[in-house]
Image (spheres, rainbow, N blue to C red):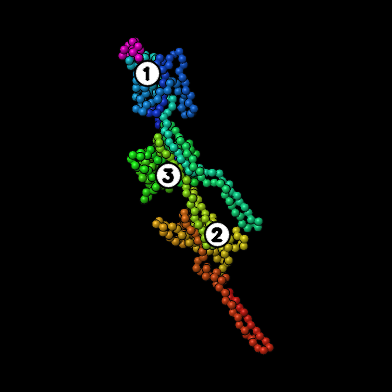
């Protein structure tokens, strides 16, 4: 099942808190602007921000802003209203202490107009690299002249890689916003996983990150070699915990978000099923019975296959039986192999015996021994009997019998 999208987005704050990288619009009558000219009004291109008034003043790396006459004012962690009150106090406190002559020392009166607004919020710059962009494809279907078969050809398709550099505003620097701005959620051609590579590589440390899987069970939200690599699964099993926390979906400067394409996976057929290579579906599980049908093999049809020119793939035996024995050859770790026998008749009645097909499986449809023996004696094994029951000079008689 898909991961709830709310888990991929950070909780929006009640109020906007200032930090390094924000740009404030500040207007101070007599210091930044005067009463003779109207204050500058800035209309942002984004509808998320209101218009700002004043001159741009950036919040420095130490969380302060620098203003004429008063120097540095700490504003980190404050709201816009609190920052405005800080500026007002910085310019009017001297006037309160020194009386009317305080303005001559660089301070303003309390009735002086001072405006502070948010001109541009801080942004987080990240890179998004995706390999799951689906290309357009066209399917061509050709029918035979006799109407006994058809063939399909797919032109195009596949996936292509894309890369974008994003500037995510503050409180929107999360996985969901990054995916939304670069084409949406990972598609069926992806690995259904988002990989985040954190920060930058310090060559002096030598801790080169790797994307290789560590031995043992895979842990979502934990890096392969170090915590600098975070994995966010997009699908989980019912009842399973996501395996990542709110801090794992946050993005910071220099992070690289990657969505990798899914490697094609196939299963193979043989025996009474036409030999071929067939892709495994990406969004649902495929059982043995469904795999036989998908590969157009005979299923409970008495061995008849109407797609070939002769109209029959397997000549009927005693009672016209259907081949029901599927041998599944499955690879195991360390280059091993296991053989699994599936009875199609039992698998159709009992879902527990309807085995799920995995990548690389080889499905060979055969007959059970009794079916093969019956077909052998009815079609292959043949006994010819010849006898001469009359042999005289004036007459001869003979008889020949073929069994079966």
User: Could you tell me how far apart the alpha carbons at marks 3 and 2 are, in whole angstroms?
Assistant: 37 Å
Residue matched to label 3: 233
Image x and y of residue 395, in percent: 67, 87
Q: Quick check: can you spot residue 146?
A: yes
Residue that appears at 45% across and 18% down: 39
Q: Of discs 3 and 2, which sits in the foreground? A: 2
SS class, disc 3 = strand
SS class, disc 1 = loop
The residue positioned farthest toward the bottom in the image shown: 393
Residues rendered magenta in the picture: 95-107
Residue matched to label 2: 274
- Residue 68 numbered tag: 1
Horizontal side of 12 relative to 295 (left or right) equals left
Mark 1 neighbour density, 10 Å: few (under 14) some (14–19) many (20 or more): few
Q: State the image quarter where residue 200 is shown.
A: top left
Mark before the other along the chain sequence, 3 or 1: 1
Mark 1 and mark 2 in contact? Answer it, CB < 8 Å: no
Image x and y of residue 204, in percent: 33, 39
């Amino acid at each position: 099942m898909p991961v709830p999208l709310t888990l991929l987005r950070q909780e929006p704050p009640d109020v906007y808190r200032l930090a390094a990288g924000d740009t404030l619009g500040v207007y101070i009558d007599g210091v930044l602007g005067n009463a003779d000219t109207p204050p500058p009004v800035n209309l942002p291109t984004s509808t998320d921000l209101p218009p700002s008034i004043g001159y741009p003043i950036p919040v420095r790396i130490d969380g302060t802003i620098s203003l004429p006459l008063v120097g540095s004012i700490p504003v980190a962690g404050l709201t816009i209203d609190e920052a405005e009150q800080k500026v007002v106090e910085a310019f009017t406190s001297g006037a309160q202490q020194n009386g009317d002559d305080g303005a001559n020392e660089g301070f303003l009166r309390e009735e002086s107009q001072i405006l502070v607004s948010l001109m541009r919020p801080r942004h987080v710059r990240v890179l998004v690299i995706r390999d799951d962009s689906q290309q357009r494809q066209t399917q061509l279907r050709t029918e035979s002249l006799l109407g006994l078969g058809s063939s399909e050809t797919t032109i195009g398709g596949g996936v292509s890689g894309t890369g974008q550099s994003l500037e995510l505003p503050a409180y929107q620097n999360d996985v969901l916003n990054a995916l939304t701005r670069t084409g949406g959620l990972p598609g069926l051609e992806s690995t259904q996983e988002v990989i985040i590579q954190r920060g930058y590589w310090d060559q002096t440390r030598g801790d080169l990150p790797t994307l290789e899987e560590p031995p043992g069970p895979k842990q979502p939200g934990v890096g392969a070699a170090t915590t600098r690599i975070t994995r966010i699964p997009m699908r989980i099993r019912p009842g399973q915990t996501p395996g990542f926390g709110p801090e794992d979906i946050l993005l910071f400067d220099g992070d690289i978000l990657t969505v990798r394409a899914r490697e094609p996976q196939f299963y193979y057929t043989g025996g009474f099923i036409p030999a071929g290579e067939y892709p495994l579906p990406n969004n649902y599980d495929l059982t043995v019975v469904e795999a036989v049908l998908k590969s157009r093999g005979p299923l409970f049809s008495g061995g008849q296959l109407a797609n070939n020119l002769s109209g029959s793939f397997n000549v009927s035996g005693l009672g016209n039986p259907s081949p029901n024995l599927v041998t599944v050859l499955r690879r195991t770790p360390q280059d091993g192999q296991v053989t699994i026998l599936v009875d199609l008749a039992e698998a159709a009645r009992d879902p527990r015996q309807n085995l799920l097909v995995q990548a690389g499986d080889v499905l060979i449809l055969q007959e059970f021994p009794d079916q093969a023996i019956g077909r052998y004696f009815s079609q292959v094994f043949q006994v010819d009997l010849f006898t001469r029951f009359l042999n005289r000079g004036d007459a001869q008689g003979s008889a020949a019998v073929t069994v079966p």
